Image: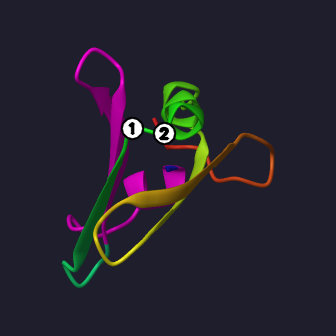
Amino acid sequence: MGTARNSADTQQLLVCYTVSAGTTAVCQARNAAGVAVSCTTTNATLVAQVRSLNSDSFLQAAYDSSGNCTDIVVGTGSTFEPKVL
C-alpha cells in the first residue's frame, strides 16, 4: 500500500474495506494510467484478510471476470515499502 501512496502521480490507488455490517469486502486499485479494477467478496476468510489490513500492509488481490475477489493476500514486513509521512 505504501508504494501506491508514495507514488509521484495522483492516479495510483489501492484500497480494501468492509461494508454491509462487515460481511462484505471490496478492493479497488488504479494504476498510473488511470486504469481501475475492483472486486467484491462475501467469503469470510477473504473478509478477515481485509480486516487485518493496516496502512503499511502489503496487499494483493486476485479477481475473476465477474468482479469477484478470488484471493486476497495481506502481509507486513521490512521488504514492503511503508508510506512516507
Above or below, 14 relative to 63? above
Residue topped by disc 1: 42
17 or 39, which lies in front? Answer: 39
Marks counted in the figure total: 2
Residue 32, given in percent of the width and then of the height, sits at 29, 78
Tell me where residue 9 appears, x and y as whole percent: 26, 70
Q: Residue at x 28, y 71 (%)?
A: 66
Q: Height in image: 37 above or below 1?
A: below
- Mark 1 residue crowding within 10 angstroms, few (<14) / some (14–19) / many (20+): some
Q: For this view, does 43 lie left or right of residue 7?
A: right
The answer to if 29 sits in the magenta stretch is yes
Identify residue for label 2: 43
Please tell me which residue is depicted at 70% across the width and 53% down the height of the picture. 80
Q: Which residues are magenta?
A: 2-30
User: What's the amino acid at mark 1?
Assistant: Thr
Between the C-alphas of marks 1 and 2, the distance is 4 Å
Q: Between 20 and 50, which is closer to the camera in this rendering?
A: 20
Q: Nearer the viewer, residue 41 or 8?
A: 41
Residue at 23% of width from left, 72% of height from top?
A: 36
